[in-house]
Amino acid sequence: MNWKLIVAIAQSLLLARWRQTLIAAIGVTFSITMFITLLSFMAGLNDLLDGLIVNRTPHIRMYNEVKPNSQQPINQYAPYQQHYNFIHSIKSGGSRQEIYNSALIMQSLQKDERVVGISPKLTAQVFFNDGSIDITGAINGIDVVVESKLFHFNEYITEGNGNDIGKVPNSIVLGKGLAEKLLANIGDVVQVTSAKGNRFQLKVVGFFQSGIKELDKVQSFASVSTVQKLLGKPSNYITDIQVRLKNIQMAPALAKEYQQLYQTDAEDIQTANAQFETGSSIRTLISYTVGITLLIVAGFGIYNILNMMIYEKMDSIAILKATGFAGKDVKRIFLLIALSIGFVGGMLGLLIGWLLSYSIAHIPFNTPSLPTVKTYPINYNPAFYVIGAIFSLVTTYFAGWLPARKASKIDPVIIIRGK
């Protein structure tokens, strides 16, 4: 088998029908270009949407859920212990939101090698007093330094300085939507009323915009000590411990472990945001489906072109076989033609796909709901390009296999006798 001769013959056949070859290559190029562009854009969009949740959500949230006591008095009464007791309108009883021994739990978590960091948090439901109108809202007490390090808090500050809530006494960062309701500016003082009826005055030091508009209309942030003061609680009062892990995939298992170990409720990020993961999976599946469909369509084009080439080159194939070329050599020639079209078209598609993705990534994209986003999101994952290259070669191989097999079985005697 002389590969140099086989390559030369394949090249001659390709150039003999260069227009059809060019159309086939363009089909592969277009398919790979759209595959890369679509997948890069969808992956970038997934990263953007997931980032709105993942960056702001702890991998594990530890808290005490307010719930009724499972051991009701009637169940403790001997005559009714063997009965099914149906109790209606059960109240929460003596349960409380405070995490017991929160300081010791946080010290223990900081020593866990699987944990990147932890952040304490507590929330106060309040009314923002705007003249005679009371606007319902919530103030989240946070450690701003830790919150910025673990959950990118400062990246969502659109005006002012978020770190000031840890430096300026009785200060607050308002959600952008809430600030617009209150007509508040940086440096203004807003009045809030706690659930117990106590009134406090807090200085506005910044505006926060998460990208979730309804959330920004009610939420605000202050230091842990300020919120403890609002609630009339001691300095060790904490309702939430937010945990960020080195490996987010370990969150469900560790949540169960921490729940048993520390006797608190624990919720992992996958459970809390299952709908977002489902949306990301569906968008990725759609991208791959569309891209593969485009490649299959291009494959049919190559199949048709090679079929036509075989019918038009019956004489050439017969002469090749009559001069000593075996059927497998003829098969290799047509497979080489198909793979050449796939390789050239695929490489051009990868290049143009990258250029198109790069161009999209530099198109300005400004929206009030996403202040941190300046251009359209694109993910330049090398895996997309590897998959695209493999798919282009595999698709064109199978598109050329049937025509090549047909060409290898042509009987030269019949062709020459017919001529």
Image (spheres, helix red, strand yellow):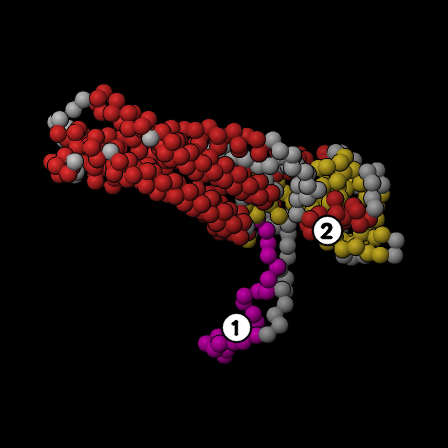
Task: Inspect the magenta stretch and tell me whether residue 201 lies in it.
Answer: no
For residue 208, side relative to residue 269 (left or right): right
- Label 1 secondary element: helix
Residue density around tag 1, few if under 14, some if 14–19, many if 20 or more, within 10 Å? some
First reached walking from the N terminus: tag 2 or tag 1: 1
Residue 357's x, y, as percent?
53, 33
Instruction: Give amino acid for label 2.
Output: Val
Examine the residues drawn in magenta and state their main secondary structure.
loop
Residue at the right extreme, as displayed: 131
Is 282 on the left-hand or right-hand side of 295? right
Seen as rendered, the residue at the extreme front is 419
The magenta region covers 62-87
* Residue indicated by mark 1: 75
For label 2, the residue is 218
Identify which amino acid the numbered label 1 is placed on: Asn
- Magenta stretch holds residue 77: yes
Q: Is residue 224 left or right of residue 45?
A: right
> Where does the N terminus fall, quadrant-wise?
top left
